Image: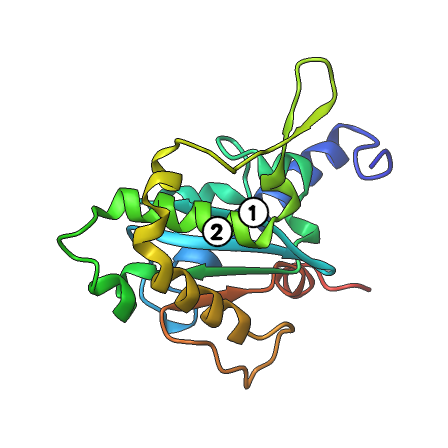
Amino acid sequence: MHRLTSDPTAARSWRRARYGFAHHLGEALVGTAGGQSQLRGPVIYGVWLRWGLLYIGQTSKAERRLRDLAVGESHHLANTFPPEIWHKVVVLAWPELPQARSLAGTIDLRTAGLALEFALQDQLCPIVNSERRRPDGGWREVVRQGSRSRGALAMHKVTDLVQQVRGLWDATPSEPSNGANVPEACRVVFPEQLLLERYPLT
């Protein structure tokens, strides 16, 4: 880091390169790259490091939230785990799934998204979602049992949807491949691969 920011010119280049990559990653997550339709509206997403699942989140505005995911101005993840080391990001436009369409009239989209997020975090326990910072500089475990949050109270309504989402996530490729078969309604991006394509090792 000292080498990459060793003088004003290097520091400016470092900042521009980092934002350029973050913007490129945001475009890959929600934009029209590769002939895909732009993602809008509710999604559930997961971020993996090489060893496994790191974070689960949801948003009702994919077009805004996922563009900021790697930038980190309103999203905390990139401030702790920089997107340059993310291995895989899976984004799922869950309202397109059959199990979600069957929920119409029983639960609103916002509540369903929160319930889906809560259930997946509860089942899979990604480390970023499982701890919270304390004011004294330490950490505390997130206790979901007995939660009265909106997502927790509605979790029982989305049981089948949760299983469908988990099945689709499990079916996504674990490594970049030109012939990878990505499940419908999913978008899978490999940030490390994008980084190498943008800044090849010499």
User: Mark 2–mark 1 contact, CB under 8 Å?
Assistant: yes
* Residue type indicated by callout 2: Gly
Residue 56 placement (x, y as % from top left): 52, 49
Q: Please state the horizontal and vertical placement of residue 117, each as a whole percent of the image.
A: 43, 48
Residue lying at the far top in this picture: please name it: 136
| Residue 155 visible to the viewer | yes
In-front residue for pair 81/38? 81
Depth check: 22 or 13 in front? 22
Residue at image mark 1: 22
Q: Residue 26: which disc?
A: 2
Q: CA distance from mark 2 to mark 1?
A: 6 Å
- From the viewer's perspective, tell me whether residue 3 is left or right of residue 164: right
Q: Is residue 30 left or right of residue 174?
A: left
For the point 54% across and 82% down, the residue is 180
The quadrant of the rendering that contains the N terminus is top right
> Dot 1: within a 10 Å radius of its alpha carbon, few (fewer than 14), some, or many (20 or more) residues?
many
Say which of 5 and 169 sits in front: 169
Residue lying farthest to the bottom in this orientation: 179
Q: Residue at x 66, y 44 (%)?
A: 127
- Could you say which quadrant of the image residue 177 lies in? bottom right
**Residue type marked 1:** Ala
Which quarter of the image is occupied by the C terminus?
bottom right
